[in-house]
């Protein structure tokens, strides 16, 4: 049975992984993507912490502190979205189980199913957008953050890009279930393509900055 | 102060993220990569759970069960490696803090530093190798697992590939600190290139299978 009440952020890491691996559809790929994005934001925050206030990086101090504060904000939002995605998916499961005996049943079930599917597409769209913001922060801090932590900025970029692409898959799998004239259904493909294109550019730019600073290899 | 005793798997997700974002260097990008790989393994396990025993997928039942069991094993190993990476990094921090007043101090510190850096390169090498195995499982289940969960197989492939590349960065940043004749230092670059090449191929193959099954987009 889906449990909408459990707070994923309060589970132990092992319990979260157990629930991910279970046959319950939630938490699933959407929540995992959001948590990957939250880890990316956490790593950006760590790089900012290891840079701010150090003489060697004084010139970038204001930028680094701003990046760190923004990362903390996105981390909170992504954890909320991890929860929302699980809740949205539970909603889909509940709608699927509604009675479909009478015509009235079927009409009510169809309305509930469409509404829950719209939410199940809307949440990962937000996860993708938030992950793009985190990727942008990783790309900004990679060339200016503490050099000893440049691999952490690189991991942040990789995980944020993976989170974005994972969220995109979760939008795409739900789109066919939306009403043909639903604006999300008609507008999402172009927005997903835009997010993926930006992600590719930012990821390449972050990787170039990391490669230039990581030393001999 | 680094705390080697805390078990990352027993922290709540929020506490883990707090520690990731803190100025303590551990847990850092290596542990985050390992956890991303463990999430990927968890998602492969979920897809296997949603496929095994269903008539529609009977032909692939044995393969799916084998993939699910292997994913559970890799998930455990990756969580152990997440812990080991944090411990290894604490070892580096401890070695850096050793006294360096006398020549004997300096010699002892240098030996301790090299040993701790070797461990800090060895662990992410294992994380990369384990993540490749998980990526392979995701690539195998994407075309044969429950179609309703194909986006989860896709997210698993993305997170496993990100985990692998993140671990590679963590090996690379530590290599320059190893002795010039250390076999890890001389042999790692070729092994890292091999892992990254395989990851690129498996990720593309998984993405093609997901795209073919995810429906209209």
Image (spheres, coloured by chain):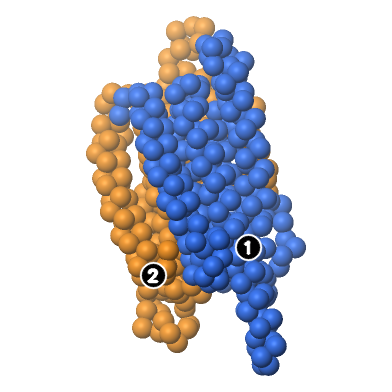
Chain colours: A orange, B blue
Q: Residue A86: where, in percent of width, then height?
A: 54, 37
Position above or below: A65 against B48: below
Q: Residue A148: where, in percent of width, then height?
A: 48, 72
- Side of B99 relative to A66 (left or right): right
Point out the residue furthest to the top here: A102
Q: Could you tell me which secondary element the residue under label 1 belongs to?
A: helix
Q: Which residue is mark 1?
A: B119
Point out the residue furthest to the right here: B5
Q: Residue A16: where, in percent of width, then height?
A: 63, 43
* Visible residue check, residue A155: no
Quadrant in which residue A203 is drawn: bottom left
Marker disc for residue A213: 2
Position above or below: A97 against B70: above
Q: Nearer the viewer, mark 1 or mark 2?
A: 1
Q: Could you tell me which secondary element the residue under label 2 belongs to?
A: helix
Which chain is mark 1 on? B
**Residue at x-position 65% and y-position 86%:** B106
Q: Residue A201: where, in percent of width, then height?
A: 28, 53
**Residue at x-position 50% and y-position 35%:** B136
Task: Work out whether disc 1 and disc 2 sit on a shared chain.
Answer: no
């Amino acid at each position: 049975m889906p449990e909408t009440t459990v707070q994923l952020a309060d589970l132990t890491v092992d319990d979260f992984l157990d629930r991910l691996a279970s046959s319950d559809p939630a938490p699933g790929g959407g929540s995992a993507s959001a948590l990957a994005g939250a880890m990316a934001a956490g790593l950006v925050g760590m790089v900012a912490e290891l840079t701010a206030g150090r003489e060697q990086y004084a010139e970038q101090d204001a930028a680094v502190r701003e990046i760190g504060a923004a990362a903390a904000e996105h981390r909170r939002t992504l954890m909320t979205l991890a929860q929302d995605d699980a809740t949205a998916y539970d909603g889909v499961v509940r709608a699927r189980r509604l009675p479909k005996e009478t015509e009235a049943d079927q009409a009510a079930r169809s309305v509930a199913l469409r509404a829950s599917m719209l939410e199940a597409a809307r949440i990962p769209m937000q996860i993708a957008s938030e992950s793009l913001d985190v990727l942008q922060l990783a790309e900004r801090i990679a060339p200016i953050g503490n050099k000893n932590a440049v691999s952490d900025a690189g991991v942040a970029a990789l995980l944020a890009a993976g989170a974005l692409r994972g969220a995109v898959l979760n939008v795409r799998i739900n789109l066919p279930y939306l009403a043909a004239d639903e604006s999300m259904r008609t507008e999402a493909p172009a927005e997903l393509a835009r997010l993926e294109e930006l992600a590719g550019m930012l990821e390449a730019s972050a990787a170039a900055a990391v490669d230039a600073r990581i030393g001999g290899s």
